[in-house]
Image (cartoon, rainbow, N blue to C red):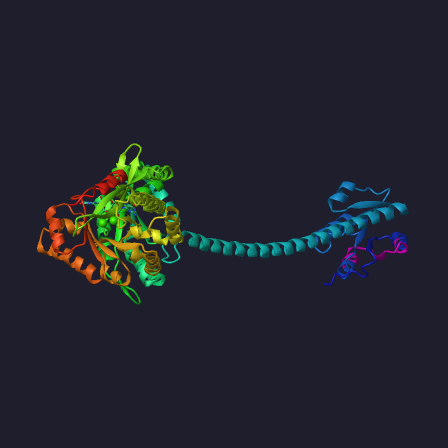
Amino acid sequence: MNHERLNPEKKDILIIDDTPDNLRVLSSLLTKQGYNVRKALNWQMALIACQTVLPDLILLDIMMPEVDGYEICQRLKSQESTNDIPVIFISALDDVFDKVKAFAVGGVDYITKPFEFEEVLIRIKNQLSLISARQEILELNTQLEIRVRERTFELEKTLHKLQQEINERQHLQNKLLDIVLHDSLTGLPNRVLFIKRLDKALTRAKQEQNYQFAVLFLDCDRFKVVNDSLGHLVGDELLVAIARRLQQFISPFDTLARFSGDEFAILLENITDIKMVTKIADDILKQLYLAFPLSRYEVFMNASIGIILGNKDYEKSEFLLRDADTAMYRAKAMGRARYHVFDPIMHQEALKLLELENDLRRAVERQEFIICYQPIINIKNRDIAGFEALIRWQHPTRGIVPPADFLPVAEETGLMNQINFWVLQSVCETLCQWQKYPEIKQKLKVSVNLSPKIFLQTNFLAKVDQILHDTQVDPRSLDLEITESALMENSDSVKTILKELQARQIKLIMDDFGTGYSSLSYLHSFPMDALKIDKSFVLRMLENQQSLGLVSAMINIAHSMGMGAIAEGVETQEQLAQLQKLNCDFAQGFLFSVAIAPELALDLLLSAPQW
Ligand code: C2E
Ligand code: CA
Ligand code: CA
């Protein structure tokens, strides 16, 4: 049934009353006031009226035959369609009117006959405005609900978008974290992640008595050679191949990390004893020993491994790593391609080394070095032909320290060049003073050892020129001793420098000849003036025919290439006699003299001895 209102502007009032007079009076009053008024004389009519159009308000007479006002009100209230319509009861003043009952059955107000018009209008208006207020509230409520629903939907949409963004960010973050914690070349965990895991292992060791872990620190022995000779791409390929081989030894509990360059570290967890660890190290070394078939080359590699067994007494994982590193260096020092297990004495030695480094820095500042001179004898006429300048360190507490004990450290800490230039400068100064003595032959020579790395110093030649200029030394009196490794490390630029030195009339001697790897090929392309046969060959030359043959061959090589031959480490007359037989030009060694202080060297020179 359609419950549309007649005129939405005009309020519709239904008067239910069996008294036509009442109906008329009320009706005309209300119609004048602009209401739409309908009339019903009893329940049936009222019902039909409501079914046609729902009134906005009902005026209901209480006293009616058959169905009275209370009953009608109750019926209206019990129907869903009409139960909201406000009912105002009409009662006569003399009626027995039960107000309580009227409200109880659902009436909202009452008016009494005879009608006080003003009052009737106010009561009707009140009820109507109550209705419209209620309706407004209802409408507002629905609007609110709609808006809430809309907002909720929007909110949900935004939330969904936000969640998506959060997910994307999380994904990106994970990806970034992955990049930050992994090595891009091999995909292995990097140093940062390794240290995190090591921290965890150390913490666990402190909590669980039975938990044991170990660190293997691995450094490739020949990687630099591969990288320098075959290029970085091959180097990278090799690193990836090494990583793959190492992965075979790693269980899901363990961590294999690329630490830097050609360094790898392995954290082994849940191990039982050191034997288990050294077995793994052994297996790794065996695997690395096999050729690496890369895309264009087949490459061979070795590694040195330092091992440290985890120990809950370590305060920080850094210290564990430090000791693994120390053990690795020990493995290298012991001949490479091996492993070494750390023991605490090594740490003491490492500390000593650190102390030495500090001392050495101070020594450079305070010039605690002296130069000793070892004579070099002309084998044919047994005169002094010259000296080799050899550095010593006059340590404030340790006394004289030989070069082998501090030069490697100087080399590593970058102090070597400074020391080397100082030697060159002092030697030139001393040489100049000696040359002032008329009895000293102008032919006298002093040779100075050069560290291989000094050629990498960009202003090397300028520095040499400066020293030559400052001391005014005759460059023909200066020899420079160079080892093969200097030539191998940077051949082209070194070749240019050597030519420049020779242009200044400085003579070049290849030192420690025979101990390098590719002597002949290098000799051929580098312009040397003499070869110094290493003392290891001279000391053994009389042991057997083979050793003698070697020395003989070296002298022949020198001569056939137009170079002089110097034998160092000559300790006996027999050796000297043999060298003379072999036509060696010069000799140097304890047979003649150890390296002596400059004053003694000058005395020796002035006494012009003959051996
Ligand atoms: P090197 O250039 O091979 O020097 C020869 C070494 O052999 C010297 O040791 C010398 O004292 C020692 N020697 C001389 N005669 C004999 C002998 O008959 N028998 C034996 N067994 N040894 C003998 P030193 O002075 O301890 O120098 C060791 C190394 O330190 C040198 O080896 C050289 O490589 C380096 N060195 C010394 N002074 C300098 C320097 O001023 N600059 C640079 N760059 N290196 C230096
Ligand atoms: Ca030398
Ligand atoms: Ca030597």
493 vs 579, left or right, is right
In this picture, is 100 found above or below 249? above
Residue in the picture at 80% in, 45% down: 109
Single out the residue that lies furthest toward the bottom.
296
**Residue 161 in the image: x percent, y percent?**
56, 57
10 drawn magenta: no
Single out the residue that lies furthest toward the left.
544
507 vs 544, left or right, is right
**Residue 531 in the image: x percent, y percent?**
22, 55
**Residue 39 in the image: x percent, y percent?**
84, 57
Residue 8: quarter of image: bottom right
**Residue 361 in the image: x percent, y percent?**
36, 39
Quadrant including the N terminus: bottom right
Residue 343: quarter of image: top left
Q: Which residues are magenta?
A: 30-47
Q: Which residue is more in the foreground, 99 or 525?
A: 525
Residue in the picture at 26% in, 36% down: 400
34 drawn magenta: yes
Q: Can residue 1 be seen from the camera position used here?
A: yes
Single out the residue that lies furthest toward the front.
438
Q: Give the number of callouts.
A: 0
